[in-house]
Image: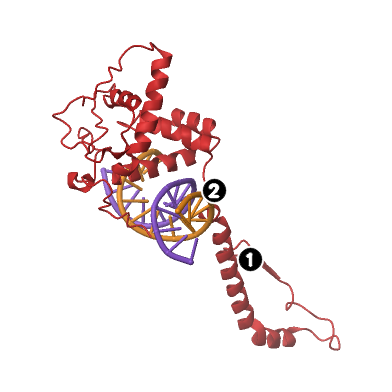
Chain colours: A red, B purple, C orange
DNA sequence: TCTAATGATTGGTG
DNA sequence: CACCAATCATTAGA
């Protein structure tokens, strides 16, 4: 008798054909062993292989989480977006920040990482599409900050780019720029790190290269235009 | 039912 | 190992 464990985790136990002495007149079973082995050996192997294959397929199917994707809760996306847009110049949450976000949103840390990975890519790829969202969350966090500190500081109400020379393209696609409150959001474009985050132009963070634009200026000149055409699917 | 949005996975890079 | 880019598979909205 032998036992082996294959890659499916199955225990293939073979006790059937070995050392069977009973039955036919008390003769040793060697003869029948040979016959049966010869007849069914290959079938046995085939069966085993196909079964194993099926198991592997099923396993991969059920273990593939993409097949049971759930959208995050409102709360989760809210929290994540808030962080993302209030750290637009450097949207790379630390491990602790990730844990914090995960806790607040009721998701796992790796889900937070996934989300930020996706968000960075997709934001960079098509900033125009996210302007409205950006304004909303930037305004929100700006309002929060204002409420937290001094209510009547800042917020002149005038629309001015922090560094006009730097922003070589600022959106004719102002479609989403509707309300005065949103002006507050513009105050956030100057990040404490001193790195310029043009809310309405392409990324120009050169310095250390990780969060800089991929989109060429021409690609976002048209409000509805979708240069890359998303290309997925 | 088609399509856009979106969370997760994969493969490649440094 | 974290990140990016592409892609997959599902969900939600038209």
**The image quarter in which residue A147 lies:** top left
**The image quarter in which residue A159 lies:** top left
- Residue situated in front as seen by the camera: A75 or A152: A152
Q: Residue at x 73, y 88 (%)?
A: A31
Q: Residues within 10 Å of mark 1 (few under 14, many from 20)?
A: few
Q: Which residue is farthest left?
A: A165
Q: Position of residue C12 (x, y in %)?
A: 51, 49
What is the chain letter for disc 1?
A: A
Q: Position of residue A74 (x, y in %)?
A: 52, 37
Q: Residue at x 18, y 26 (%)?
A: A163
Quarter in which the N terminus of chain A is drawn:
bottom right
Labels 2, 1: front one? 2
Look at mark 2 in the image and give the residue it sits on.
Answer: A70
Task: Determine if residue A203 is in view.
Answer: yes
Look at mark 1 in the image and give the residue it sits on.
Answer: A4
Q: Residue at x 32, y 37 (%)?
A: A176
Task: Determine if residue A93 is in view.
Answer: no
Pointer 2 or 1: first along the chain: 1
What is the chain letter for disc 2?
A: A
- Residue situated in front as seen by the camera: A39 or A77: A77
């Amino acid at each position: 008798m032998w036992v082996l464990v294959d890659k499916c985790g199955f225990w293939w136990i073979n006790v059937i054909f070995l050392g069977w002495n009973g039955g036919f007149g008390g003769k040793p079973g060697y003869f029948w062993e040979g016959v049966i082995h010869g007849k069914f050996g290959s079938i046995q192997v085939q069966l085993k292989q196909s079964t194993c294959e099926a198991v592997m397929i099923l396993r991969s199917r059920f273990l593939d989480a993409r097949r049971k994707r759930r959208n995050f809760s409102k709360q989760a996306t809210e929290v994540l977006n808030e962080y993302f847009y209030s750290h637009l110049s450097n949207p790379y949450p630390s491990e602790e920040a990730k844990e914090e976000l995960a806790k607040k949103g009721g998701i796992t840390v790796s889900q937070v990482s996934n989300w930020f990975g996706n968000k960075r890519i997709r934001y960079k790829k098509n900033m125009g599409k996210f302007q409205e969202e950006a304004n909303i969350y930037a305004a929100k966090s700006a309002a929060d900050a204002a409420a937290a500190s001094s209510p009547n500081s800042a917020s002149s109400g005038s629309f001015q780019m922090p560094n006009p020379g730097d922003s070589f393209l600022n959106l004719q696609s102002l479609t989403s720029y509707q309300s005065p409150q949103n002006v507050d959001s513009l105050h956030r474009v100057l990040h404490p790190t001193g790195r310029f985050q043009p809310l309405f132009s392409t990324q120009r963070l050169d310095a250390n290269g990780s969060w800089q634009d991929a989109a060429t200026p021409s690609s976002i000149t048209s409000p509805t235009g979708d240069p890359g055409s998303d290309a997925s699917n």
